[in-house]
Amino acid sequence: MYLTLFGFSLLGSAANAAPWAEVDAIWAPDASGQWKRVKSSGAAVLVEETTTEVLSVGFKLEEGQRIRTTQARVRIRLHKKGQLVVRPSSDVQLTEGGTLQAVGEVFYSVEGAFRVQYRGVEAAVEGTQFTVGPDSSGGEGVEVAVGEGRVRVASQGDSVLVKAGHLTEILPNSGPAPALVMNSSAKNAFKGLRKQLGLPSASVALLSTQSVGALNGGWNTGLRVQGRMRLSPGLRVVAESGLSSDLSYFSLHESVGLERVLGPVSLGLHTDVRLGEAVDCEGTTGLGVKIGGSGSLRYRLALPHGIGIETQMRLGYDSTLSGELGLGVSFGS
């Protein structure tokens, strides 16, 4: 446990030393028109009052700075906030709590409170993946499409909540239209964008746990390893393996379930199998198998480079009621 806390302290120190934002990747077309990752591109620049500066991978960015692209895509990592990808022919300024888009389209994968302003439209989120850009007709309207989490979109005094797998369009001088389910082509485009930009569709987590049973009241110390795979916007399958012990006996835990992602918070339902010490009706001690179910509530605090600190609460039943608290680290998203 002390080593775990020490590790978290090191992670926190590293996070505090990180820049406010940093250029993480740049894509540009080569002579044949194929898009490839490059170290720098004259089609992606930092815009100052009277000058421009070519961006390169590793370029440190500060709050208030403005990025413009022509034939290039730029992925920017935001300290403790996640990342954004500025698409070609876009202009965006980094603000204290979000961005100010002048033109173009930006893909966001962010954690915690975040606001995007574009053409009089404001999108407020609490950790999610979404895009903000021109409407499907390429006119003066705005489209907000949500791939994960929820986004509150406001314009002209009206607002609408857009959930994962939905989108809304806002015409000039109008409030946002009711959210509609993305059609298959829009969903495939969103999935393709994630893959194209190298965003992970899976993650792994290591959690140190403390659990207590409702009957015996004894505390067990344990360890869980979780693997998560993204199935669709806002939905993941979770498989995990672990063990727990009260120093007199130990038990193995296997679990599989589904998890709903709502920004930094996740809600899960799991089927559990526990192999451990059991006492039969004659008082003989041996190995026993218990099958049950559990529900979980997890919160993830994002750090740079896909690392997160997680805390999890779990309530389960397999002939007895049990509760569990977990704390650990995750890699991926």
Image (cartoon, helix red, strand yellow):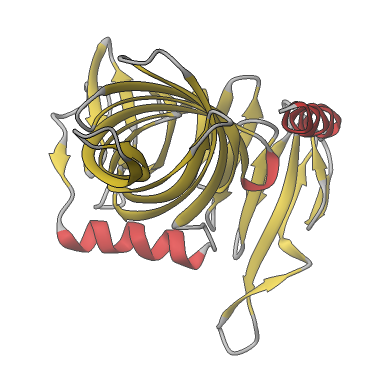
- Measuring from the top left, give residue 101's x and y in whole percent: 52, 35
Vertical placement of residue 57 versus 77, above or below: below
Q: Please give left or right for residue 138 compared with residue 329 in the image.
A: left
- Measuring from the top left, give residue 58's x and y in whole percent: 82, 52
Quadrant of residue 330 within the rendered picture: top right
- Measuring from the top left, give residue 37's x and y in whole percent: 67, 71
Q: Residue at x 16, y 33 (%)?
A: 179
Q: Nearer the viewer, residue 59 or 158?
A: 59
Q: Nearer the viewer, residue 242 or 267?
A: 242
- Measuring from the top left, give residue 243's x and y in whole percent: 49, 43
**Farthest residue toward the bottom?**
32
Q: Please give left or right for residue 135 compared with residue 58 in the image.
A: left
Q: Please give left or right for residue 187 compared with residue 6 in the image.
A: left
Residue 105 visible, this orientation? no
Q: Quadrant of the N terminus?
A: top right
Q: Nearer the viewer, residue 98 or 205?
A: 205
Residue 223 visible, this orientation? yes
Q: Residue at x 30, y 42 (%)?
A: 234
Q: Nearer the viewer, residue 251 or 193?
A: 251
Vertical placement of residue 295 versus 74, above or below: above
| Tally of numbered tags | 0
Q: Residue at x 22, y 33 (%)?
A: 318
Vertical placement of residue 92 versus 264, above or below: below
Vertical placement of residue 199 versus 65, above or below: below
**Farthest residue toward the top?**
157
